[in-house]
Amino acid sequence: MTDTQWPVWEVFVQANPGIPHKHAGNVHAADAEMAMQNARDVYTRRSEGISIWVVPANAISASSPEDQGSFFEPSNDKPYRHPTFYKIPEGVKYL
Amino acid sequence: MEDEKKLAAFEAKIAAGNKIEPKDWMPEAYRKQLIRMMSQHAHSEIVGMLPEGNWITRAPNLRRKAILLAKVQDEAGHGLYLYSATETLGIDRTELLEQLHTGKAKYSSIFNYPTLTWADIGAIGWLVDGAAIMNQTALARGSYGPYSRAMVRICKEESFHNRQGYEIMMHLAQGTPEQKAMAQDALNRWWWPSIMMLGPSDDQSPNSEQLMRWKVKMESNDAIRQRFIDRTVPQADFIGLSIPDKDLKFDEASGHYEHGPINWEEFFEVIKGNGPCNAKRLKARSDADKKGRWVRDAAMAYAEKKKLKAA
Amino acid sequence: MTIQEAKFQYLLRLGDSSLIIGHRLSEWCGSGPILEEDIALINIALDFVGNATAILGYAATVEGNGRTEDDLAFLRSEREFRNLLITEQPNGDYASTITRQFLYDVYTYYLYEALKSSKDETIAALAEKSHKEITYHLRHTTEWMYRLGDGTEESHERMQNAMNDLWMFTGELFDMDEVDATLIKEGIAPDLNTIKEKWEAHVKPVIAEATLQIPSYNFKQKGSREGKHSEHLGFLLAEMQSVHRSFPGAKW
């Protein structure tokens, strides 16, 4: 067996009820339970969280910088997806 | 040709104040320099646990014991953030630690000095963390995203370290004559190493220009050092301790303190491995790693077994 | 024995045990098997120091002689300490530390659970807070019992050795004397026989699942109730109290 610092797990912490989990960083751990405990000890030492997700880092697929053009720019010319695109006469309510 | 275009885009991005992220293209020199700096920083945090850890079991009261434990724990946490940020550059922690244990990687010169009395815990928090914070606040504005984010988090957490150190010194300085003498002695021993830990003088720091342009380095060593001295001297005055520099004087014209000559020979000796505690610190880290090997192996073996059972 | 005397003694037992085992855990600082575990151990040590501070503070109040928690921690000698023998046993290897911690965590888990309904409101409130911390400690140590007990051949052997060495200190966890009798009658402290049943029902299946054996010997060490300790405590206190004792009356 080669020496190991254990696999990396990405850590997501929910700071308060009702808001999304946010990426906090990562920890090394041999298993999921350990990853959760390590995440708790490392990323919530100052009451930063009420819920934790841990995900094996190698289970995450990420887009690459080269994808930026083809992935994200096409949405730039679709302003009609945003409510501000539409002009509604003053005085009309609940729209 | 391709690389030149990429380099131009890379530099433009930095000039515009954007961050470089792990998957972005970066020049090899940038990656290498960052790995060197960030791992050195990470190693400093975990080696830095040792001189202070030395006093946890002897802290003079329960409050101080809890504070010191929390502080040393933060340092472990900071080491962890920094290793993790370094890993985004494509090198893993096992390899980084190996570089530390074999002496290939460096860590801050300051941690090769011994902590001889309880007052040293105050001096470290006040001076060493004070100097480190100056440096880290600058680095938080650096161009590499993961490093900069780690710095922001670390600076936020570290502000209490600096204060608790000063508080220890204040209590000692206002205490019995023996306590005050202990505080002055600690200041005498830690002042110059703290000044030196901010790195060699600008005229002895080559290739700084490119690193500044790439926002790997944000400020020159001398500029940070000057700011540290300007802020710290009045703090010493306030609690009635004297800075061990007979040439120290305030220059009205520039608004800065002028300090006496720094013993760079000592600094370079410590960096080379000839400080009072270099061998001891390295051995402590490397022994812990060796002693922990069977534990790490067992945890992996158990995880594998459980996976097989579940399958 | 008055209720006040009994309460003072009882609080010393609780507070000293936390203080001493917290001290032992803090000795790991900087030499844990991996960075994450260093952080975890310091967290647990911090919980114990906090618990000791609160309990010894209350002990000092109950005593009413003007002593503080620091006086109790730093100015008593070996024979005056009331911590359980298991808490002062040296860290040894990681297997010893985990085994010691597990056997003790299960004990405090049920003890503090019972103390949550103590008729003494301060004790009940302290127990309420501590029980949450202990619940986490126990989760941490239980997982490590499995990992190391059922990990590799080497880790299994180390764990079995640790169990063989430490089992003899588990008997006195449940010893009762006049202090307990006085407080049980008042509804302040629980009958340790009930804690013993729960402790046994809890540790046995974990030890079995960790593929370990409970040693066959019946011999149990005792003595902490009367301040008769192992030789280890003297050195621990000499270290812990050295700065405080060297500067009598100093403020820090």
Image: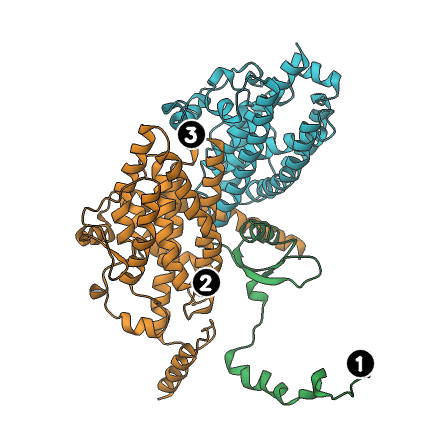
Chain colours: A green, B orange, C cyan
Q: Please give the residue where the numbered disc 1 appears in the rendered image.
A: A95
Mark 3 residue type: Lys
Chain on which label 1 sits: A
- Please name the residue shown 54% across and 19% down the image: C66
- The secondary element bearing badge 1 is classed as loop
Mark 1 residue type: Leu
Would you call the spot at circle 1 few (<14 residues within 10 Å), some (14-19), or many (20 or more)?
few
- Residue C251 shows which numbered tag? 3
Chain on which label 2 sits: B
Would you call the spot at circle 3 few (<14 residues within 10 Å), some (14-19), or many (20 or more)?
some
Q: Nearer the viewer, mark 2 or mark 3?
A: 3
> Residue A18 appears at what percent x and percent y?
71, 61
Chain on which label 3 sits: C
- Image quadrant where residue C184 sits: top right
Q: Please give the residue where the numbered disc 2 appears in the rendered image.
A: B85
Q: Nearer the viewer, mark 2 or mark 1?
A: 1
Do the residues at discs 1 and 3 belong to one chain? Answer: no
Between residue B82 and residue C120, name the one nearer to us: C120
